[in-house]
Image (cartoon, rainbow, N blue to C red):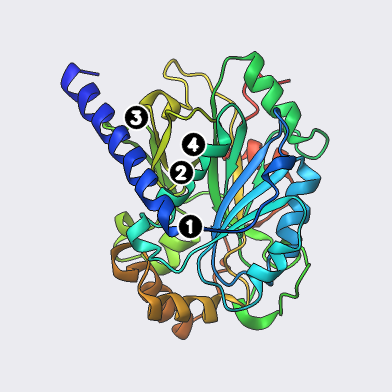
Amino acid sequence: MGVWQSYRLRVRRKRWRYRAFLKRRELSLFSDHTRAIGRKDILLFSTLRNEKVRLPYFLKYYRDLGVNHFLIVDNDSTDGSREYLAQQPDVTLWTTGASYRKSRFGVDWLNFLQVKYGHGHWCLTVDPDEFFIYPFCDTRPIRALTDWLDNSGLRSFSAMLLDMYPKGPIDSQTYVEGQDPFEIANWFDSGNYTITRNGFYGNLWIQGGPRARAFFADDPEASPALNKIPLVKWDRSYAYASSTHALLPRGLNLVYDNWGGEKASGCLLHAKFLNTFSQKAAEELERGEHYAGGREYHSYRQKIADNPDLWCKWSEKYINWRQLEILGLMSKGNWA
């Protein structure tokens, strides 16, 4: 990396951190339990709107995994999400009615909270429909992973976003509050992925899966990015640059081995495609707060109206993390 590129990245990181500092004014503390955060606690950060039906299982899943405290921004929910979260003793909640789009899709808000509360902690940043899995997650808590990362001198851990969907029309089964979403959405694409490298940030760029196949068949390069770096040993000098797709400093994005080996990595099981999806897509189209004027949601609306079934003859039913490792979608690397 040249001197000029290094300078540009440094300036960009300072800009994102300054934006986050300014955007703190948009956040109102609604329920504060930060005094309960211990020095070595594992923290989860998230931004959401109208996700009440998902929250009971989301919180249970991550509590069972070993997350100690949740720091959540509620973006003007009207479905009771705010009131539900305020009742949870391990959740600290902020509310805002400000623009999700103008906060860089919530990144500025979370960057500020991570600087203020995340320094020195392992921090997991996920959406309410994303469920983190990693090697041995069925037998080892997340602290076993972070301890191994600490001992290995690693500061970040990648996870590919794996879109999950049901067999049959998306709206044919009703998801109920508290239910494991993967009782319904338990199929995924085992192939159909492309990987390129971003020369500026140094991260891998992954696209494909059912969204590229079904919603962006005519323009696969416009399909959503599936590369994520959700788990980071946070330092107050860090900043997410683009959702959780890329971080600064640039070295945090180098979550792969250039010499042919494989670093350990995980997946984020993405429970987007439930019967709640159509209503959510319509709401987000009306709000116009998503990337590129909601282009992604326009594609969703058209496809769901034509044929709401994402299953195809190449779909594979999810079993466990070992299956995903065999398929090359995640890796235990040298973590034994």
Q: Judge the density around disc 3: few (<14), some (14-19), many (≥20) Cα neighbours within 10 Å.
A: some
Looking at marks 4 and 3 on the same chain, the residue that comes earlier in the sequence is marked by 4
Numbered tag placed on residue 115 in the rendering: 4
The spot of residue 136 in percent (x, y) is: 76, 33
| Amino acid on which the number 2 mark rests in the picture | Phe
Kindly report the distance in space between the C-alpha atoms of the residues bearing marks 4 and 3. Answer: 23 Å
Of residues 266 and 106, which is closer to you in this image? 106
Disc 4 is placed on an element classified as helix
Kindly report the distance in space between the C-alpha atoms of the residues bearing marks 1 and 3.
Answer: 32 Å
Observer-side mark, 1 or 3, equals: 1
Classify residue 270 by image quadrant.
bottom right
How crowded pointer 2 is (Cα within 10 Å; few <14, some 14-19, many 20+) is rated as many
Residue annotated with mark 2: 112
Mark toward the start of the polypeptide (1 vs 4): 1
In this view, 196 is above or below 156: below
| Number of other residues with Cα within 10 Å of mark 1, as a class: few under 14, some 14 to 19, many 20 or more | some
Label placed on residue 47:
none
Give the residue at x 21% y 29%. Answer: 8
Question: Label 4: how many residues lie within 10 Å, few (<14), some (14-19) or many (20+)?
Answer: some
Q: Nearer the viewer, residue 130 or 105?
A: 105
